[in-house]
Amino acid sequence: MLNKSPNAGESGEPAAAKAYRTLERMIVTLELAPGSIATEGSLIERIGLGRTPVREAIQRLALEGLLEIRPRAGLAIASLHPGDWVRVIDARWGLELVLARSAARYVTSEAAGRFHVAAIGMQDAVVANEVLAYLEADKAMDEALALAAENPFAARCAAPLQTHSRRFWYRYRTETSLAEAAGQHVLLIQAILHGDETAADQEADRLMTLLRAHAEAVARR
């Protein structure tokens, strides 16, 4: 039997990856409020992981623009400016189409399984009206897309934009946002699983169109 890495948790996930995932979720769900100041020590205490993995996660989140490291002043959680959501979607749009087409072309059985789990998770979240469960399924869908597309360059560029978009969506969602977003994601997943590159491209474009419409409405308020 292989021994676990000393930096891995009980699940086998590396501690740095767990720290990143936990802090990312806290930023997306506004548990770490936009514009607030935190400290490395306070985050270590809150998530119960060691200094090294938390520090690695902080560095990664800073590179992605989700927080700012201010020497001797703490960690500033990124603010949310309504107009920026449109900019995030515009930057993300072309990447999503590339990933969708490639995923339809190269999807493997492993990726297909992940897509199925994400689709079911989204549908269950709509039925139960569980926004946090939807966010988890949305994250899982993005990870399945990155795996299936076999284009690490596009996936690495898209990942932080997907996180920023998820954060804006959570903050500015409406009563109909959950069902609309989940439904369009499921249509995209179905196109990918059918290996239909054209349909995948079209459904990804429709998803970005839907999100941009919401972003534009928020910016006009």
Image (cartoon, rainbow, N blue to C red):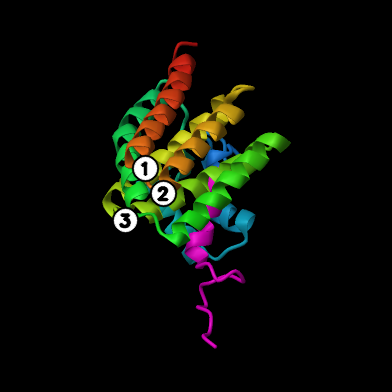
Residue named by callout 1 = 196
Q: Which mark is in front, 1 or 2?
A: 1
* Residue type, label 1: Asp
Q: Position of residue 167 (x, y in %)?
A: 51, 35
- What crowding class fits label 2: few (fewer than 14 Cα within 10 Å), some (14-19), or many (20 or more)? many
Q: Which mark is residue 150?
A: 3
The Cα atoms of the two marked residues, 2 and 3, are separated by 9 Å
Residue named by callout 2 = 145
Q: Position of residue 21 (x, y in %)?
A: 52, 53
The Cα atoms of the two marked residues, 1 and 3, are separated by 16 Å
> Is residue 193 within the magenta segment?
no
Q: Position of residue 87 (x, y in %)?
A: 35, 26
Span colored in magenta: 1-26
* Residue type, label 2: Leu
SS at mark 3 in the image = loop
Q: Is residue 124 left or right of residue 32?
A: right
* Residue type, label 3: Glu
The Cα atoms of the two marked residues, 1 and 2, are separated by 14 Å
Q: Residue furthest bottom?
A: 1
Q: Is residue 152 left or right of residue 137?
A: left
Q: Which mark is in front, 1 or 3?
A: 1
In the image, residue 72 above or below residue 2: above
- What crowding class fits label 1: few (fewer than 14 Cα within 10 Å), some (14-19), or many (20 or more)? some
